Image: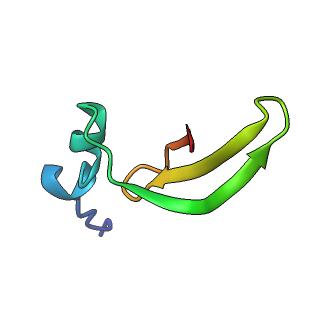
Amino acid sequence: MGEVIKFPKVSERFKGRTLCRSGFHKWEIVQEKQFDVKRGRLVTLMRCKRCGAEKTEAV
């Protein structure tokens, strides 16, 4: 007999990604006050807990 494959529910498959697609990321600080040589100022590196997107914010 063949193997039975269990498909994940839709809510489990897209868990945490639907908010990020709409622009509602959950940012957490990865590195505080890192100096950017090109801009000549302090920047903070932030990463989204759900999808892993990164952004930098000037301090």
Q: Quadrant of residue 18?
A: top left
Say if 22 sits above or below 30 in the image. above
Q: Which residue is depicted at the point 32% across and 65% down?
A: 2
Report the residue that reaches farthest toward the right.
37
Task: Give the x, y percent position of residue 36.
Answer: 78, 41
Q: Which residue is depicted at the point 30% across and 40% down?
A: 20
In the drawing, does residue 24 fall left or right of residue 45?
left
Task: Give the x, y percent position of residue 32.
Answer: 61, 61
Q: Nearer the viewer, residue 33 or 13?
A: 33
Q: Nearer the viewer, residue 15 or 38?
A: 38
Q: Which quarter of the rendering shows the N terminus? A: bottom left
Task: Give the x, y percent position of residue 23.
Answer: 28, 33
In the drawing, does residue 40 fall left or right of residue 12?
right
Q: Nearer the viewer, residue 14 or 8?
A: 14
Q: Which residue is depicted at the point 59% across and 50% down?
A: 44
Q: Which quarter of the rendering shows the C terminus? A: top right
Q: Which residue is depicted at the point 32% across and 68% down?
A: 3
